[in-house]
Image (spheres, grey):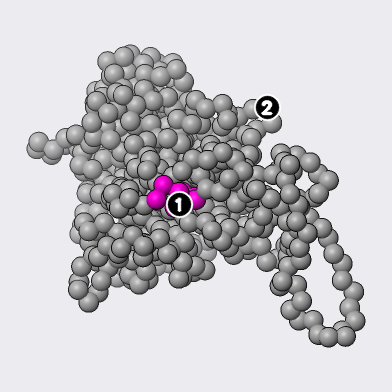
Amino acid sequence: MATVAHAFSRGLPWGLAAALRCEIQVRLWAGVLGAPWGMDLGSGGPEASGTLDDFKFIFLDPCARLYDRSLESNPEQLQAMKHIVRGTTRPAPYIIFGPPGTGKTVTLVEAIKQVVKHLPKAHILACTPSNSGADLLCQRLRVHLPSSIYRLLAPSRDIRMVPEDIKTCCNWDAQKGEYIYPAKKHLQQYRVLITTLITASRLVSAQFPIDHFTHIFIDEAGHCMEPESLVAIAGLMDVKETGNPGGQLVLAGDPRQLGPVLRSPLAQKHGLGYSLLERLLTYNSLYKKGPNGYDPQFITKLLRNYRSHPTILDIPNQLYYDGELQACADVMDRERFCRWEGLPRQGFPIIFHGVMGKDEREGNSPSFFNPEEAATVTSYLKQLLAPSSKKGKARLSPRSVGVISPYRKQVEKIRYCITKLDRELRGLDDIKELKVGSVEEFQGQERSVILISTVRSSQSFVQLDLDFNLGFLKNPKRFNVAVTRAKALLIVVGNPLLLGHDPDWKTFLEFCKENGGYTGCPFPAKLDLQQGQDLLQGLSKLSPSTSGPHRHQNHPQEREGEGGLSFQVEPEWRNEL
């Protein structure tokens, strides 16, 4: 039984004066102690049984609940925050399943702020696998919690790479010009500590009390190895039954995007390319999707995409998210290129430019490049960035454009074309702000315009790609990340005949063709998917790391994201700990 205490908010009388006659309406709600969301007393439901020691009546101002008011119209984000603050899932983790552009980090940040606000005894550890991700959390949290947060950096971090606004709340001593590590008692005074997952091990070494952190939040949880996640959990979280303080683990990520980065074939073979988030979603019944969707007590799937034009979102939504995503991006932003003169069909902001190029390598370099595709990408960049007053041409700065390729050598060639070879592009003052990189470098990012160079044109190299998990073929996670970075315009340059052998690329190609978005070399009269599947399946039997019962189920033995062997061929892209 829960003890219900009657109490009125001390903040109620402000603005009232003695002998002032006014009419006051009082609504009584039953809510978890300290939680910002009330619950109708007679509603019953799982929350009515009590998830904390006691309840109390609280006054709720619907307009003052959130720090980020934009979340008020998003029921999925509100649902996630409600359950996180109430701790309904303890001792099991709570999962925020965040497809591209749905605001999972925004949700996570708001949830942290609400926990700090409404649970006075809470202490939070917020982690990500990358420094850039941890910096982003710190920057967003310090807006409303400037004195409550502390960013703990590793001594290997180049201070020049640390954002200026973070240097005032981290362990960098400007006078000494070095990193310092405060005493444990000093760190325990902060309500929120922010670290990378690996740096969290310093807190374990410092023998933080097992019950100090009541909440641990891990962002980008689908992008880190399971042992990496456990560094921030084992030795720091005291798992307690529902009804007691503490023990709340929150994982935010997307199992349909790129997983952990591995360089060991042995680790790949034994499932370390499988994140904790993905394993829970795949094997734990608490997180299974039922006839009525996911159980909101344990998991929330965010459904509103605030990034992309509906056309750009269409195919990945069908392939990976059960068609549930809703395009909610600002209309002006997402349609700014719908009248661009370079579109094969006005109003359809996707271009697939077919190029029958050639795979090439230089010397002993294992990486591939495709000169024809590099030239085509450069041509589109000139059209987009060159000054023009023609109707339908949006003004665009290089920082709003991104170029993606899965091969390092192609990235280098495109960069060379932009900054050295082409006179018009290299003459732009801010051309260096145009980012050219791998799919891995763009995960979690967005641009108004994205250009993709797929490179591969020869079937003779498909076996190499399968062996080393390179390129786009049979890599649905890499395909998904690449095509969901664009907000308003997506341009893909590639060989339609070869890409048509892959089911996902075939779907995308036919979508472009049917809607008038295809241009370039003649479109194949028939994309022989069965022949392509036979080719890929036959070759994959020779590759030990690509077996699996279903393409989109993401089993441990079926690492379709960035594979371990790929980094023996190409240097590591992510260099952050």
User: Helix, strand, or loop for circle 1?
Assistant: loop
Query: How many dots with numbers?
Result: 2
Asked whether 445 or 529 is in front, the reply is 445
Measuring from the top left, give residue 182's x and y in whole percent.
30, 64
- Number of the label disc, if any, that sits on residue 213: 1
Residues under numbered marks 2 and 1 in contact, where contact means CB atoms less than 8 Å apart: no
Measuring from the top left, give residue 285's x and y in whole percent.
56, 26
Label 2 belongs to which residue? 291
* Left or right of 384 on screen, residue 345: right
Prevalent SS, magenta region: loop
Q: Residues within 10 Å of mark 1 (few under 14, many from 20)?
A: many
In the image, which residues are magenta? 209-218
Q: Report the residue at 33% width, 70% height from top.
A: 167
Q: Report the residue at 42% width, 35% height from top.
A: 276
Asked whether 287 or 478 is in front, the reply is 287
Q: Report the residue at 40% width, 60% height from top.
A: 188
* Left or right of 490 on screen, residue 270: left
As for residue 268 lying within the magenta part, the answer is no
Q: Residues within 10 Å of mark 2 (few under 14, many from 20)?
A: few
> Which image quarter holds the N terminus?
top right
Whether residue 539 can be seen here? no
Amino acid marked by disc 2: Pro
N-terminal of the two: label 2 or label 1? 1
**In the image as oriented, which residue stretches furthest toward the left?**
363
Whether residue 176 can be seen here? yes
* Left or right of 312 on screen, residue 210: left
User: Helix, strand, or loop for circle 2?
Assistant: loop
